Structure formats: C-alpha cells, structure tokens
Image: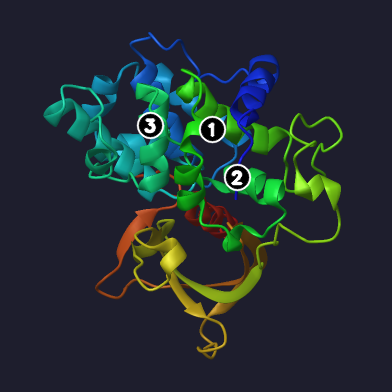
Amino acid sequence: MHISPTLSKKILAWYDNSRRNLPWRVSKKSPKKLYYRLLSEFMLQQTQVKTVIPYFNKFIRKYKTLEALADTREIDVLKLWEGLGYYRRAKNLLACSKTLVKNYNSKLPETLEEIKTLPGVGNYTGNALLGLIYNKPTIAVDGNVKRVFSRLFNKEDNKINFEKLILKNKKKLFNTNRNSDFVEGIMEFGALICKPKNPNCITCCLNKTCKYFKSRNKIKIIKKKMIKTKNYDIFCLINKKKQVALARNTNISFLKNFHLPIIKDSNILPINKNWKFLKNYKNSISNLKLNINLYYKFSRKIPSPYGWYSLERNKEFMPSFTKKIFKQLLNLF
C-alpha cells in the first residue's frame, strides 16, 4: 500500500487552519512542554478531549511543574484525578514523573526503547512523546490514525499492518521538518474530519485519493463496541454511627483496589431474608452497564477483612462509584 507524498503537507495545511486551541499545546521552546505533554497524554488514554481539559487545568494550577508533581503524594494525585476514571493512569503518571526527575534530570529519554521503560508508557504513548518532544519521524497510532489510513485504502483496520505501512512509506510521510505537528495533526484530523460517524468527506482535503470516499457505504469500517450488561447485588453492613463496612476489592476486575462493600454476582448468591432491599440503580463504566440491587442491614460486627468508614466524614480518596452508594445509605438516617 502506497501513501501519497502530499498527504503530510495536506494534513499540516489543514492543521494550521483548523486545530483546536488546547491548553497543553504550548510553544515548542516552552520549558513546560514536556510536563504538559506528559500530563495530557496520560489523561487522554481512553478519555475524550472535552473531558480531559478541566482536569488538566486543575493539575497545572496545583502542580505548576513536573518537579512539583513528582514531589507530591499518591493520595493527593488520586484525589485530584477523582472522576476521570482508570485510576491506574494517575498512579503511573506520578511514578513516571518521579522517574524522570530522579533518573533523567527532568528530561525525556531520546529513544523509544528507553521511553517505554517509564511507568505507564507503551508503544503509543512512547511514539507520541518522541514525536511531540523531539520532533522525531514517528506516528502515534491511535484509533483516529487507524481510521484515517483504513479509509484511505478502504480496508478494515484489522487488515492493515500499521507498523509496516508507516515504515514502508516513511520518506513520504516525513518529508517536512514538522514531524511533531504531523504527529498531532493526523490525530486531530481523525478526531475532527475523519470521524467514526458522519465523517466530513465532502470538505476533506484527502478525498481525491481516498478509496473510502469513492466507494462510500460499501464497507463498514468502524465496529461499535459491544455494550455488556452485568447484574450485581451489593450488600452494605452499616451501624448506628453512620458507618459502612468497606474493604479493598480484588475480585471484580473493573473495580480492582477500590474501597467497596460486599459485591456479588446476582446470579450466584441467593438473597438472605436478613438483608433489606434499599434501591435499584444503574451505573456505567466504559463499555459496561451495571444493573445494581442495593441491600443493607445494621450490624455491630463486621467480617475481619472489612473496616468501618464514616458515611459523612470520610476524607480518604473514594471513587465516585462508592460515593453513590454512600449517598443512598445516608437516606436511611
């Protein structure tokens, strides 16, 4: 598969005229460039730009430099991250910042292999940082980039070896000295023009060479994520002091390491008559829909792995999932 040698120039021309004004896009000479890019790349993993912007602004107000972030506690970072989801990213961000400050004098390593040794940095994030920080000829292949190339050749993205495609067309793709802008420009183009639904094919600067445009509706490129529904029963032990029994959960993968009450698959555990039904409510996490039945009973004793937590005065980091349960339980008092 051959890419047009004009593709990068067209993407850059479009990017110069149409790019969004995002807070992490600072001057290439700015001393804040690495910190802003590192922070935004971790936040943008599996999260939309519009959701990330307010969180990014909160972080840079509190931690103005990479060094300031590296010097803070994990619990403080998690608290500021609260509501953004995928909390492992926050832990990796803090660990990565500490590594850069301590081992690399607050600078980014200059090879992909070394960058990928940093906590939480994989192939995509490593390539993104390498291009954005050092202007290296590389592309961060995310869903947006895959979609652009897939539509250019009118093929499903799982039929394309993107690493081989980029390597084969390297001279055509990186024929300017603006590699960092091209890295970001092609992702931006996929997000705003070559969208998953209703792409702006008529105004697209690539439509003359785009096979998808020439044969629209003949092949479906984008597959919708399967939305799964899970049914859970949550059993809350509470006491007269407005406290609930919580423990670190390790059995349910999407809630790993959260402080939670007793959670069971509703298809497995029969409901004991000692538990009183409180409420049914829905919750969504990524592509998972949760149908939750909430039960409670008052008790003075709790199982040994659990501890009492105040429903009103709890100051620890708590995910929004757990706080929703707290809100329901407080209605009992």
Q: Local crowd at mark 2 within 10 Å, few (<14), some, or many (≥20)?
A: few
Colouring scheme, one of rainbow, by chain, secondary structure, one colour: rainbow
Residue at the location (73% across, 42% down)? 195
Residue at the location (61% across, 21% down)? 12
Q: Secondary structure at mark 1?
A: helix
Residue placed under numbered mark 2 in the picture: 2
Q: Secondary structure at mark 3?
A: helix
How far apart in space, not on screen, are marks 2 and 1 (Cα)? 9 Å
Q: Local crowd at mark 1 within 10 Å, few (<14), some, or many (≥20)?
A: some
First in sequence: mark 1 vs mark 3: 3
Residue 157 in sight here: yes
Identify the amino acid type marked 1. Lys
Q: x%, y% of residue 166?
A: 49, 44
- Number of numbered tags placed on the structure image: 3
Residue placed under numbered mark 3 in the picture: 129
Q: x%, y% of residue 331?
A: 60, 56
Q: x%, y% of residue 198?
A: 82, 44
Q: Nearer the viewer, mark 2 or mark 3?
A: 2
First in sequence: mark 2 vs mark 3: 2
First in sequence: mark 2 vs mark 1: 2
Residue 93 appears left or right of 178: left
| Above or below, comparing residue 262 to residue 45 in the picture | below
Report the quarter where the C terminus lies: bottom right
Foreground residue among 275 and 187:
187
Residue placed under numbered mark 1 in the picture: 172
Q: Quadrant of residue 109?
A: top left
The reply to whether discs 2 and 1 touch (Cβ–Cβ < 8 Å) is yes
